[in-house]
Image: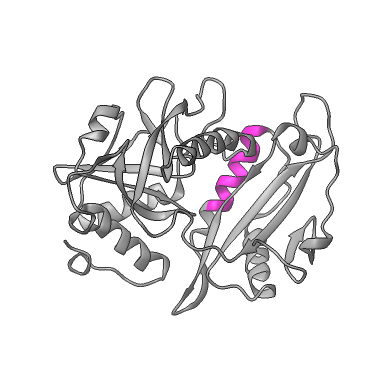
Amino acid sequence: MYYNENTIVYYNGAFIKAAEARGNVYDQTLHYGYGVFEGIRSYATENGVQIFKAKEHFERMEYSCEAMRIPYPYKNEELIAISYEVLKRNDLQDAYLRPLVSCTPNMSLTKAKGSHLLIAAWEWGAYLGEKLLRLKSSSYRRITPVSFMVAAKVCGHYVNSILATQEAKDLGFDEALLLDIDGFVAEGPGANIFLEQDNVLYTPQLGSILPGITRSTVLEICNELGITAIEKQIKPEEFKGADSAFFCGTAAEVIGIESLDTIPFKKDWKDSLGIRIQKAYKDLVLAKKFKQEEVSA
């Protein structure tokens, strides 16, 4: 699904076949989940293949390494150029890129002594599909900033996401919704969340959530379209009584939500603020100029 015998990745300074890439069984990331990564999308636009917000993604990866005290001897401008080369060598346009900084062998519980760099890419459609999602409130809580660097995109953090997603799917739902340690709405396993109430959008404030690049983009779109968007702590009962809701993330893009715990939202998706955001976001990543009248309800 992700690679074949001809797939090329960039690994530790060279373009090589994915099938020939070799790791070390003593790498610290393999044993402890101590590494960082990014998820980035590229799109076929009228101006050629464009990686959406590449600079912001690699700056976040650099921040994540600094926060986790993982060596980052890379120049982000070079990593962006390498990413375009990976796309070119694999003849990819609409694709998903996965830069990963992993740690060299170290069995002690100390900071990394060195790092490896991988940049891979593959074709990937809508991560959460095209249909409206049926969410299940998760029995798992989002990782707490008291114990983790939640603003860093760390490999090990996603064990929490896997548990939440699989629990929801085992119960017949599409995806999970996690609360934070204090019982407020946090985010999905791999996406930030917005809800609509009385023509205003609300999204959980920073603190216990990943500061998503798509989340920031949605807030920029709201400002452009004159949509009021408020960051605040959101109680679960506020969420269940909302007019509409949507997930957003690089992999998920903007995807509407049908219900939470089988309770449907009040508005049809076609009448929601979310569909306006979804249309504007698609225009943005395809390098098309959107206007308020073009995406109005």
In the depicted structure, whether residue 49 falls above or below residue 219 = below
Residue at 22% x, 65% y is: 295
Q: Describe residue 56's horizontal placement relative to residue 219 as left or right.
A: right
Residue 49 colored in magenta in the image: no
Q: Position of residue 38 (x, y in %)?
A: 59, 49
Instruction: Give the percent coordinates (x, y) of residue 140.
Output: 48, 27
Q: Quadrant of the N terminus?
A: bottom right
Q: Main secondary structure of the magenta part?
A: helix
Q: Nearer the viewer, residue 222 or 126?
A: 126
Outermost residue, left side? 198
Q: Is residue 95 above or below residue 188?
A: below
Magenta span of residues: 57-68
Count of picture labels: 0
Image coordinates of residue 29 in percent, x first then y, are 74, 38
Q: Give the quadrant of the C terminus.
A: bottom left
Left or right of 230: which side holds 123?
A: right
Please give the name of the residue rendered at 77% of the width and 24% of the height, measured from the top-left corner.
109
Asked if the magenta segment contains residue 60, the reply would be: yes
Q: Is residue 61 above or below residue 159?
A: below
Toward the viewer: 162 or 111? 162
- Residue 282 pos. (x, y %): 37, 65
Name the quadrant containing residue 243: top left
Q: How are the colours assigned in the image?
A: one colour
Residue occupying the point 26% across, 58% down: 275
Could you tell me which residue is drawn at 49 percent across and 44 percent down? 190
